[in-house]
Amino acid sequence: MESLTRDIWERIKGSRPGPFPVLHYQDVMKRYGTDKPDLRYEMPLVDVTAAFARDTQGTVGPLFAQEPASPQTVLALCAQGAAPIFSRRAVKDLSVEAQGFGAKVS
């Protein structure tokens, strides 16, 4: 299939593209959380579990009202460069939505 696509591309565009990237299921699921990632944007999942762990005083991390019943992993999207497009109102709306999932927002 790759060879056919490259041949058609060459006939239409006049240049032959390089080989297609090979993505392994386990790696893609761990990095992007889906088996069909949109590779136009580099937005991998980042493990932020440590930010929500108990601190030295034994209190739960800053965003959750209580610790989950069982150990869990907390993942977040890393949207580098997105800060300028998030208005104060958009961040507030996201905070309200997160509170619906048990987040404690100060």
Image (tube, rainbow, N blue to C red):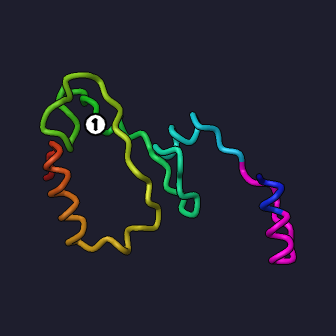
Residue beneath the point at 85% across and 64% down: 7
Q: Is residue 4 left or right of residue 40?
A: right
Residue 104 % position (x, y): 14, 46
Residue at figure coordinates x 82%, y 60% from the top left: 18
Residue extending farthest to the bottom is: 13
Name the residue carrying label 1: 52
The front one of 59 and 25 is 25
Residue 13 is a magenta residue: yes
> Across the whole image, how many numbered discs are drawn on residues?
1
Q: Is residue 98 above or below residue 74?
A: below
Q: Position of residue 53 (x, y in %)?
A: 28, 31
Looking at the image, residue 38 sits to the left or right of residue 11; the answer is left
Residue 88 falls in which quadrant of the image?
Answer: bottom left
Q: Position of residue 69 (x, y in %)?
A: 19, 23
Boundaries of the magenta span: 7-21
- Residue count near mark 1 (Cα–Cα under 10 Å), binned few <14, some 14–19, many ≥20: some
The residue closer to the viewer here, 80 or 23, is 23
Q: Does 21 sit above or below residue 64?
A: below
Disc 1 marks a residue whose amino acid type is: Phe
Residue drawn at x 24%, y 27% is: 56
Could you say which is closer to the camera, residue 98 or residue 33?
A: 33
Q: Dot 1: what SS?
A: helix
